[in-house]
Amino acid sequence: MKKFVKGNEAVMIGALYAGCDAYFGYPITPASEIAHAAADMLPQMGKVFLQAECETGSINMMYGAASAGKRCMSASSGPGMSLMQEGLSYLAGAQLPAVVVDVQRTGPGLGNIGPEQGDYDQAVKAGGHGNYKCIVLAPASVQEMCDLTIRAFELAFKYRNPAIVLADAVLGQMMESLELPEGQLQVPDTKDWCVRGDAETRQNLIASIYLQIDLQEEHNWMLQRKYESMAADTQAQSYLTEDADIIITAYGSCACIALSAVDELRKEGVKAGLFRSITLFPFPKEELAQAAAGKKVLVAELSNGQYRDDVLLHLPCEGRGQVELINRMGGNLIRMEAIKEKAREMMGVKA
Amino acid sequence: MTTSLKELSKIPMKLTPGHRLCAGCAEPIVARQVLMATDKPVVVANATGCFEVSTTIYPYTAWNVPWIHTAFGNAAATCAGVESAYHALRRKGKIDQEMRFVAFGGDGATYDIGFQSLSGAIERGHQFLYVCFNNEAYMNTGIQRSGATAKGASTTTCPAGSCVPGKQQYPKDLTMIIAAHELPYAAQAAPHNWKDLIAKAAKGFEIGGPAFLNTLTPCPRGWRHDSDKTIDMSKLAVETCIWPLYEYENGKFRLTAESARIAEGKMEKKPVSEWINSQGRFKHLTKDRWMDVADAIQEEIDRKWNKLIQLTKL
């Protein structure tokens, strides 16, 4: 069945199919419609919608619900995501599964409510304190706003780790047709770690504090091993990359524009391809190396080179010299023409 | 303090027309009334919200006075910082004139996310006036419930339906909570009674310590009433005792204006049903399904009103 919905509504539809038990929200543009949908849908299904007094409140409500083994989520943007960073660190430290959708707006500071991808480092490198990582998924359509929200729940429970769906204002606000998912998401049983106040979970302890330094170090090593193991779940899209001379790489709404640019360049005889990261952490390192081997790479992003830096970090050494960046900030999108022009320039082709 | 309309009209405007707040918004009315209450140079700190966004859309500004904004929940902290810097500069002799400081925040920025920062600033004793524009929801982000939203009001995050009668909780009594800080001055005001509001703001500016003014700011968009009914709404809130006008000054509570007259039996106390019937956000409460909610609200308003009268007798 198909429905014509806003990206933000698609998130909540996905959350329902993922079996979300509780939503803890706080208003912020351009993410508020996710809370509106949650407030509308969840109580009717006997589930929980709560509005906190601030984002610090909502992320810590998630800590409480996740500790009980429940599937919980929140959504925010800009300053709200900044306020959630401490809580994300606690969730990661205590190995609790939770999903946060970041409908990125512009920054820094108040910024405005237009689209930007400036929260890349905050999400992917973990903006809170300590040696932790969040799983980060980057949708590029209304369909993926739904599907990757489900996937975020799946991975969050698989790894007992917070997962961020890194969207942006374009994806949150635009409408497209959505193919409704089939079936309910099954997640692993939580009784081995959650605390439900019953005999079965009496032994379990949820904590991120180890006052003995060796134990705290071991806890950190264990977390790092877990993050490394997440490489098994990388996801990326390679489009016309095999015979390409130049690869345009992007994620999120920016990748939609890059995709159009690739098609247009092909029509002009420039062998371009698109590499789109779907998981940003774990980063699709192997997939990128394969798609970009021996090719020029143009990174398109709505931020100050944050994604480009990761592309450089993950590309094999020999590929790094051929990477260039095209970017916009402040709520501006990159025009497809500008991507084409930059690609032609890199290929030494005249329009 | 000047309180004749003729005199007030001569005061230079600190917040100019041409801002982009909605037709019928009470916020600029209250802001102008507050700013008329001092003839000293004034610095404005503003929390995130309709008022901040709509008066400062770059490259324009509606402000004729120094104005500062940081985050959503930090207006009181920012104001405390500016006030501290002012005192330091005064001590060094770098500023020779007396100045006043005022922070404006909506109910979300005051009752909810900014409560910690406001409480801290009051406890530390900064000399500033904090004015809350209480329109009883997060209007800037699309009418979500707040700690100030009335019981029974329908918002986007507590939509009324067959299961739920809109917001299920009563609002926080923030003025009383602030009064419990035992600060020099706290008051409730509403824009229809400009004389009362300006007098309270003037006291707040001159009290010599932290002062708090909670103002009711009807919002046609969120409350679902016609935009020419803003002042009527303000008046009705006081007449139904939904929003009593009172002040707390150096440990004493005192009713003012219409509220004092209602308490003295010189004015009719209108039923809450008039309030509920006047706004679309309460529309569902007039149906059989939620009739009992309207009754419960009347009971609670009566209880709080009687309690307030008792407090004024202490």
Image: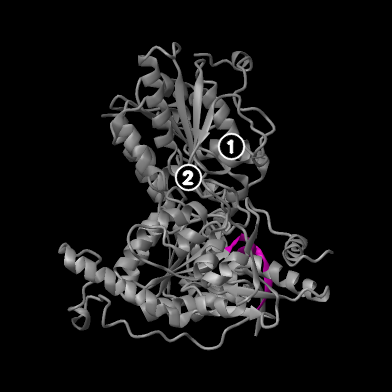
Q: Is residue A216 left or right of residue A130?
A: left
Disc 2 designates what residue?
Answer: B72
Q: Is B141 in front, or is A82?
A: A82
Sort mark 2 into few (<14), some (14-19) or many (20+) by Cα contacts within 10 Å. Answer: many
Task: Using the image, tell me which numbered label, if any, was put on residue B26.
Answer: 1
Residue at 32% from the left image edge and 37% from the top image edge: B120
Q: Quadrant of residue A167?
A: bottom right
Looking at the rendered image, the quarter that the C terminus of chain B falls into is: top left
Q: Is B270 in front, or is B214?
A: B214
For marks 2 and 1 on the same chain, the one whose residue lies earlier in the sequence: 1
- What is the magenta range? A168-178
Q: Is B23 in front, or is B298?
A: B23
Q: Position of residue A81 (x, y in %)?
A: 46, 57
Q: Position of residue A238 (x, y in %)?
A: 63, 80
Going by the numbered disc 1, the residue's amino acid type is Ala
**In this rendering, is residue B134 above or below B166?**
above
Indicate whether residue A177 is drawn in magenta: yes
Closer to the observer: label 2 or label 1? 2
Q: Secondary structure at mark 1?
A: loop
Check the image and name the residue furthest to the front: A318
Query: Distance between the Cα atoms at labels 2 and 1?
Result: 20 Å
Q: Position of residue B292 (x, y in %)?
A: 45, 60
**In this rendering, is residue B62 above or below B279?**
above
Q: Secondary structure at mark 2?
A: loop
- Number of marks in the rendered image: 2
Residue at 33% from the left image edge and 40% from the top image edge: B177
Indicate whether residue A290 is drawn in magenta: no
Q: Position of residue B162 (x, y in %)?
A: 52, 69
Task: Using the image, tell me which numbered label, if any, was put on residue A281.
Answer: none
